[in-house]
């Protein structure tokens, strides 16, 4: 599978890993937009929320929010707060077609998060 995030999860492309369990893998974004910017992905290739089937969600997504709690606690941003971003599809600005949640924090973030 020629997917950069599948290759990162498999250890075939190096990344700064912050978390791993049976289903999920998390690593620092190569181009951070805040002091903490981590990407959380399922190890199974799922292109996006739009492409995810109900069966894939049931099989691959349990533990997603628990992983976020563990990661944010580990990185010291659980108390201060953080933002989850899941860019989806062309208008959503998704550039890597393997579902990922951006976990962004480490400073007070502005709102709204988008611009033209
Ligand atoms: P998207 O735009 O799809 O929501 O987010 C893709 C994210 O993946 C971007 O923030 C980008 O910086 C990050 N990214 C792309 N390629 C790599 C890579 O090879 N390694 C790491 N660590 N992050 C990457
Ligand atoms: Zn993939």
Image (cartoon, helix red, strand yellow):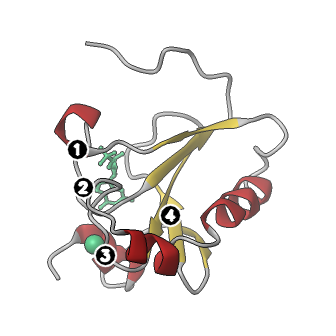
Dot 3: within a 10 Å radius of its alpha carbon, few (fewer than 14), some, or many (20 or more) residues?
some
What numbered label is drawn on residue 27?
Answer: 4
Answer with mark 2 or mark 4, whichever residue precedes in sequence: 4
Answer with mark 4 or mark 1, whichever residue precedes in sequence: 4
Residue displayed at 52% across by 70% down: 61
Some atom of ligand 2 lies within 8 Å of the CB belonging to the residue at label 3: yes
Residue labelled with disc 3 = 45
Q: In which quarter of the view is residue 6 placed?
A: bottom left
- The span from disc 2 to disc 3 (Cα, nearest Å) is 11 Å
Q: In which quarter of the image is the N terminus?
A: bottom left
Of tags 4 and 1, which is closer to the observer? Answer: 1
Dot 1: within a 10 Å radius of its alpha carbon, few (fewer than 14), some, or many (20 or more) residues?
some
- The span from disc 2 to disc 1 (Cα, nearest Å) is 9 Å
Judge left or right: residue 47 versus residue 28: left
Confirm or deny contact between disc 2 and disc 3 (CB under 8 A). no
Residue displayed at 21% across by 72% down: 3
Q: Is mark 1 on a helix, strand or loop?
A: helix
Q: Indicate the position of residue 46 as horizontal and vertical percent values.
A: 31, 69
Q: In which quarter of the image is the C terminus?
A: top left
Q: In which quarter of the view is residue 67 placed?
A: bottom right
- Which of the two residues, 103 or 30, is positioned nearer the viewer here? 103
Residue displayed at 39% across by 84% down: 11
Of tags 2 and 1, which is closer to the observer? Answer: 1
- The span from disc 3 to disc 1 (Cα, nearest Å) is 16 Å
Some atom of ligand 1 lies within 8 Å of the CB belonging to the residue at label 4: yes
Q: What element carries label 3?
A: loop
Some atom of ligand 1 lies within 8 Å of the CB belonging to the residue at label 2: yes
């Amino acid at each position: 599978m020629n997917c950069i995030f599948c290759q990162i999860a498999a250890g075939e492309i190096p990344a700064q890993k912050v978390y791993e369990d049976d289903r999920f893998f998390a690593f620092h974004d190569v181009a951070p937009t805040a002091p903490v910017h981590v990407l959380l992905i399922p190890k199974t290739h799922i292109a996006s929320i739009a492409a995810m089937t109900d069966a894939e969600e049931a099989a691959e997504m349990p533990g997603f929010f628990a992983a976020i709690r563990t990661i944010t606690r580990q990185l010291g941003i659980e108390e201060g707060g953080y933002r989850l971003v899941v860019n989806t599809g062309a208008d959503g600005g998704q550039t890597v077609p393997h579902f990922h949640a951006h976990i962004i924090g480490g400073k007070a973030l502005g709102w709204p998060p988008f611009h033209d």
